[in-house]
Image: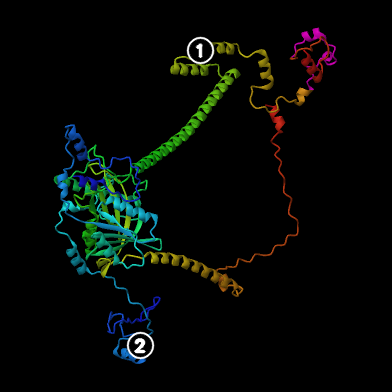
Amino acid sequence: MSALKRKRGGKGPGGKAKKVKLVENGNKPQTTEMEQNKEITVPPPVDITTWTNWRNKERVLVFSSRGINFRTRHLMQDLRTMMPHTKADTKMDRKDKLFVINEVCEIKNCNKCLFFEAKKKQDLYMWVANVPHGPSAKFLVQNVHTLAELKMTGNCLKGSRPLLSFDPQFDTEPHYALLKELFIQTFSTPQYHPRSQPFVDHVFTFTITDNRIWFRNYQIIEEDASMVEIGPRFVLNLIKIFQGSFGGPTLFENPHFESPNTHRRVIRMATASRLREKQMVKELQKLKRTENKEAVTRDVTDDVFATPAEERPVHIELEAPAAKVVKKNKHKAFKRQRKQNR
Amino acid sequence: MVFGPQNHCLYPIILVNNTMDIIEDDEQLGETSEQDSELSDGELQDAFAKGLLKPGLNFTTQEPKKIVNNVEGLKQCLADFRKNTLPWIERLDMVNLPADDIVAKSEGRLDNKASEDINPDDDFQREMFFYRQAQEAVLEAMPRLLKLKIATKRPEDYFAEMAKSDQQMQKIRKKLITKQIMMEKSEKAKKLREQRKYGKKVQVEVIQKRQREKKAMMSSVKRYQKGMTDKLDFLEGDQKTAKGGAGKGSGGQTPDKKAMNKKGPNAKRKYKDQRFGFGGKKSGTKWNTKDSHNDVSGFRAKVAHGKGGKGGKGGKAGPGGRGPAKGGAKRLGKNARKKMKGRS
C-alpha cells in the first residue's frame, strides 16, 4: 500500500510550478486510513486491489533533437502531461545516426518512441516508431498549439485515460490502417497504469482532411457529449512509412507531400517570375518607343462611304441684311404703376 | 541520361534507364529506353535501324519518380504489429463519422458527412467537424464504458492533480470574463448611440410639430382678424382635442381671448389696415407715391413753423405723437432728445 502511495505521489514533468494549490492525489483510500481511527468508513471510489492488474506494458519515450524552439518544447511537455506512460530523455545530438535511438529506447525500457526533430529552426518533424522491430513513420508537424494557450479552456485529470476517435478513412487505405494501429498503441494509456486516473474524461480525435492528419483533444463535460477543447493540437503531414524502426525499407511514400524547402522555393520562384514578367513588359515597351514609326498617310479606305453632296448654285449677297426689329412689350405697364392701381 | 521532351517540345522522346536493359515504355508515343549515357553513333544507328528511334530531334529528360506504395508489405507489417490479445478496454479506440449537425438539419442544409467534403480552409466548418466526430465517439462509447463499469464522471469530492494548474485556469477565466465585459460594453455603447440618434430625431420632430402648430394658429388668427372667417373654431378645436386628450384644456385663457376678438380691432389698427393693407408682403406700400407726395392735406402751417402750442396740439386730431417734454417748444432734435432721456 505504501509503495503504491509513493508511486502515486507522482513525479510531475519538469517545468510545472510546484506551488500548486491542489491536494495532490487526495484519494479516498488515504482518508479512510485516517478515518478508520475515528471508526468511520467511507468506501473508496476505486477499488485499489484491482490495480495490480497492470498488464499492458507500453512505455513511450518522448524526446527531441537539438535546435527545437519553445513551442516544440511545450508540445513535448504537454504530451507527457497527457500520457502518463511516457518517459523523457535528454536531447539527442545531431551527429548521431537515427538508429541510435533504438538503443536509447532499449536502455530506458521503452517500446514506443515519439522523436521530434527540428531542422533549420523552422521545420518540425516527428517520428512515431515501435522500437525493436516494428514500423515507424515520419511526419511533418504544422500548426502547433499548446496546452497553455488561453483559448484552450478545457481541463482534465492528469493522467486520465483518453478515448481515441478515428476517421473512417483510416480503415480504407492500408497505410492509414497501419498508422491507426501505431497511434492506438502509442497514445492509449494502459489500464491500471500506476500513474493513471481511473476516469475517462477526454477524447483524442484523429481526422484525415486535405491529405493530413489533424489531432485534437477535447474534455468531456457532460454525459450528453458537450465538450471543450483542452489542447494541444497539431497537424501531421505524412512523409514516409518504414518497415523497421528508424530505418529499413520504405513501405509507403506520401505522393501529396511537398517538403517545406520545395514549398518555400515555389513561393520564391513565383514572386521572381512575376518580377521578371514585369521587367520584360517594360523592356518591350521601351523597344516599341524607340522603333521608327512610319507616318500614317492617307488611308485608302477613308472615302469608301463618302457620298458627295448635291451642287448648289452660288448665291452672292449684294445688299446688307435687314436689321432685326426689336419688339418692346408695350402692353405691360410699369411695375410701380401696376402696383398703384391695385 | 534520358531523352525526352523539354519545355513542351513535341518531338518524340527516348527514355533511358540507368539499368542496361532496353525497355519499351509506350509504343504509341514512340518512347523507348536505351543504353547508357555515352550513346555512340554506332549505337544510335543501330537503334534507328531497329525502329526504336523516330526521325526528328530527340531530347533528354528525367525519368518520372516512382512513389513507393508497398501494399502487401504494409498489410504484412500490420498483421505482425497488431496486438490481437488486447481487449477493447485497453485501447479505447472508436471509428466514427461525426454526429448529426443539428443546426444544419434544422436549416435544411445538406449534411456532408465525409471528411473529404469539408473545406480545410474554412476554419469554423473544419473545427465543427472535429467536434462532432468527438461527440459521436463519446455517445457511442458511453454505454460500452458503463457496461465495463468505467466511470467518466468523477465524484464531487475527488481531488486530484489536473493537467492544467489552478493558476492557468484562473488566467483563462479572467480572459473570458474580460472578453465578455468588452462585448457588453460595446453593446451598451452601440445602444446608447442608437438612443441618442433616436432621441435627436424625436426632439427634432417635436420641435417641428410645435412650429407647425404655431404657424397654423397664427394664420387662423390672422384670418379671423382680417375678417375672412368669423368663426373661432380653431381655438375650440384646440380646446376640444386638449380636453379629449387630457381632460383639461387651457380653459382659463380662451374666453378672454374670445371677448377681445369680439370687440374687433381698435381704431389705430383699423387706420393702419386701411392705409397699409392686411399684412402680407412689404411691397413698397409705405413709400411715397406721386399722389401721396402731392397731398398736402396734412399740412398745418402753425405746427410746421412751431407756433402751434399745447392747445393747438391738443385740438388737432392727428396721428401725432406726444408733445415735447417742456411745454410748447418745437420738437427737439435726436441728440437733444437722447440727452433728455438720459437725464430724466
Do the dots labelled 1 and 2 sit on one chain?
yes
Q: Residue tagged by mark 2? A: B39
> Residue B278's spot in the image, x, y percent?
64, 22
B306 falls in the magenta region: yes
Which residue is labeled 1 in the image? Answer: B251
Q: Position of residue A254 (x, y in %)?
A: 29, 66
Measured along the vertical axis of the image, is residue A65 above or below residue B285? below
Instruction: Write the residue at 35% across / 85% down.
Output: B37
User: Which quadrant of the rendered structure holds the C terminus of chain A?
Assistant: top right
Q: Which residues are magenta?
A: B294-318
- Alpha-carbon neighbours of circle 2 within 10 Å: few (<14), some, or many (≥20)? few
- Counting residues from the start of the chain, the first of labels 1 and 2 encountered is 2
* Relative horizontal placement of residue B217, taking residue B160 as reference (left or right): right
Give amino acid for label 2. Answer: Leu
Badge 1: residue crowd in 10 Å (few <14, some 14–19, many ≥20): few
- A8 or B271, which is in the foreground? A8
Give residue A265's position: percent from left, percent from top. Answer: 42, 67
Chain under disc 1? B
Between residue B5 and residue A99, name the one nearer to us: A99
Left or right: A332, with B173 as reference point: right
Residue B99 can be seen in this image: no
- The correct choice, above or below, for B252 with respect to B75 in the image is above
